[in-house]
Amino acid sequence: MKNLHLDYENRPRKYGVTPDDLKAMQQRRIEAAERRQAEAAENERRAVALGEAFRVLKGEA
């Protein structure tokens, strides 16, 4: 006998990704990339400041 999935309880479940979900995931990816980029820039700024501080301590500046 062929299963036509006419009964609600035994129907195939569809848990696909909706277009709104895709937009939200893309937005989270963009925000995460911006956050990583800002953290990298801040780390670079701190490294330069630390290098300057070491030069001052060493007496080169």
Image (cartoon, rainbow, N blue to C red):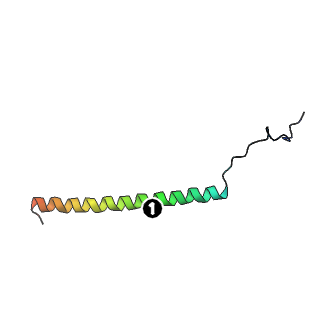
- Could you tell me which residue is drawn at 16 percent across and 58 percent down? 54
Q: Amino acid at mark 1?
A: Glu
Q: Position of residue 26 (x, y in %)?
A: 56, 58
For this rendering, which residue is in front, 34 or 11? Answer: 11
Furthest residue toward bottom: 61
Rendered image quadrant of residue 46:
bottom left
- Could you tell me which residue is drawn at 11 percent across and 64 percent down? 60
Q: Position of residue 10 (x, y in %)?
A: 79, 37
Rendered image quadrant of residue 11:
top right
Furthest residue toward front: 9
State the quadrant of the C terminus.
bottom left
- Could you tell me which residue is drawn at 25 percent across and 62 percent down? 48
Q: In this rendering, is residue 35 above or below 6?
A: below
**59 lies left or right of 39:** left
Furthest residue toward right: 1
**61 lies left or right of 24:** left
Say which element carries label 1: helix
**11 lies left or right of 54:** right
**45 lies left or right of 15:** left
Q: Residues within 10 Å of mark 1 (few under 14, many from 20)?
A: few
Furthest residue toward left: 59
- Could you tell me which residue is drawn at 11 percent across and 59 percent down? 57
Q: In this rendering, is residue 6 above or below 35?
A: above
Q: In this rendering, is residue 17 above or below 59?
A: above
Q: Position of residue 1 (x, y in %)?
A: 90, 33
Q: Position of residue 24 (x, y in %)?
A: 58, 58
Q: Which residue is mark 1?
A: 34
